[in-house]
Image: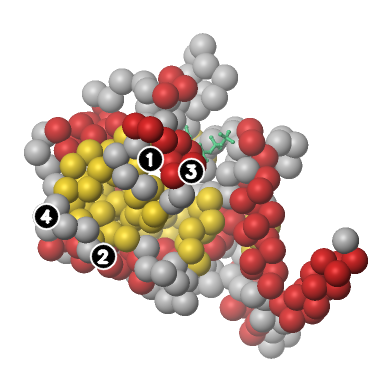
Amino acid sequence: MTIDKVVIPVAGLGTRLLPATKSQPKEMLPIGRKPIVQYVVEEMIAQGLRKFLFITGRNKRSIEDHFDRDPELVNRLAEAGDQDALDEIPYEQEGVEFFYTRQSIPAGRSAPAGLGAAVGLAEEFVGREPFVVALGDTIIRSGNHAGLVKRMIAAHVKHNAACTIAVFEVEPDQVSRYGIVAPRGRIGSEFDARDVVEKPAAADAPSRFAIAARYVLHPDIFDAIRVTPPGVHGEVWLTDAIRILIKQGRTVRCVRLKPDEVRYDIGNPESYFQAFVDFALADRRYGYLIRQYIQKRLREI
Ligand code: UTP
């Protein structure tokens, strides 16, 4: 079975990053040299995924512009022999296709209806094969970009899972920010989920394993989304739809991030600043200078 489709939800309002997100998508904010969502697309291309569906929304048109083919730019860079710049736009290649659909804000609400509702819009694109969901505001940085989703796809196929989730351990005071998994059985680099809960209070959290913004899903998720009632904040949560699959006795497999796989969820100013600093420090050309600059500034304050 070849899994080559990925759904990237980018329809959220990015309220926590206002005013930067007032008229531009959170997913287009730069981290180092690139917009956040370009890292996500490059990660997916590195795992062999070729067909992208963005779930867009209000003020998200610049994402379509960014991934639109630009043969003039490519020719200009090629003629100038600027391989470095060409390497920065690896999505401009044959066989990679981008599609878009829009998640409108439902009548009576001031925000889109949630991640589950966003994924639900991908049904026609997906058809009957399993597919990947990668959140457009979360970068997974690793020494080996091809690793995580490939491991997830392998686990998904091997265990005939309905859903496979990437997970990582968070501090107890962080569990209320994430979807949290209750493990079943022995916990190794992979395990089955007994339950999943969205944003539990620290006292109610069944573990410290948080969902890390990457999923492999069987298309049966669409039936589950259809019957998922709105949950926290009145949103239809993907976590609640996955919970329905577990209740139906389906296998939900969890794959842990490796120690060198770091998740950057660019949801609030603190995580945005942290991600920017890390990527600036790792920049192949300017990282060394930025390190010197930060060291100098820290000595001064
Ligand atoms: P978040 O809940 O972190 O993003 O969704 P948000 O809603 O934009 O943020 P705040 O709370 O207003 O600050 C994670 C990802 O899912 C997408 C978002 O665009 C983001 O990339 N999303 C979220 C949707 O596509 N649709 C939704 O209804 C909600």
In the picture, which quadrant includes the C terminus?
Answer: bottom right
Q: Image check: 62 left or right of 109?
A: right
- Rendered image quadrant of residue 85: bottom right
Secondary structure of the residue carrying numbered label 1: strand
Which circle's residue, 4 or 1, is located before the other in the chain? Answer: 4
Q: Are marks 4 and 3 in contact (CB under 8 Å)?
A: no
Q: Which residue is mark 4?
A: 160
Asked if disc 3 is less than 8 Å from ligand 1, the answer is no
Q: Which residue is mark 3?
A: 174
Distance from the alpha carbon under mark 4 to that under mark 1: 23 Å
Label 4 amino acid?
A: Asn
> At 64% from the left edge and 66% from the top edge, which residue is drawn?
278
Q: Nearer the viewer, mark 3 or mark 1?
A: 3
Label 1 amino acid?
A: Gly
> At 45% from the left edge and 36% from the top edge, which residue is drawn?
176
Which circle's residue, 4 or 3, is located before the other in the chain? Answer: 4
Secondary structure of the residue carrying numbered label 4: loop
- Rendered image quadrant of residue 51: bottom left
Using a 10 Å C-alpha cutoff, classify the residue at mark 2 as few (fewer than 14 neighbours), some (14 to 19) or many (20 or more). few
> At 69% from the left edge and 63% from the top edge, which residue is drawn?
277
Q: Which residue is mark 2?
A: 189
**Residue 269 placement (x, y as % from top left):** 68, 45
Q: Which residue is mark 1?
A: 179
Distance from the alpha carbon under mark 3 to that under mark 1: 11 Å
Q: Are marks 4 and 1 in contact (CB under 8 Å)?
A: no
Q: Nearer the viewer, mark 4 or mark 1?
A: 1
Label 3 amino acid?
A: Gln
Distance from the alpha carbon under mark 4 to that under mark 2: 18 Å
Which circle's residue, 4 or 2, is located before the other in the chain? Answer: 4
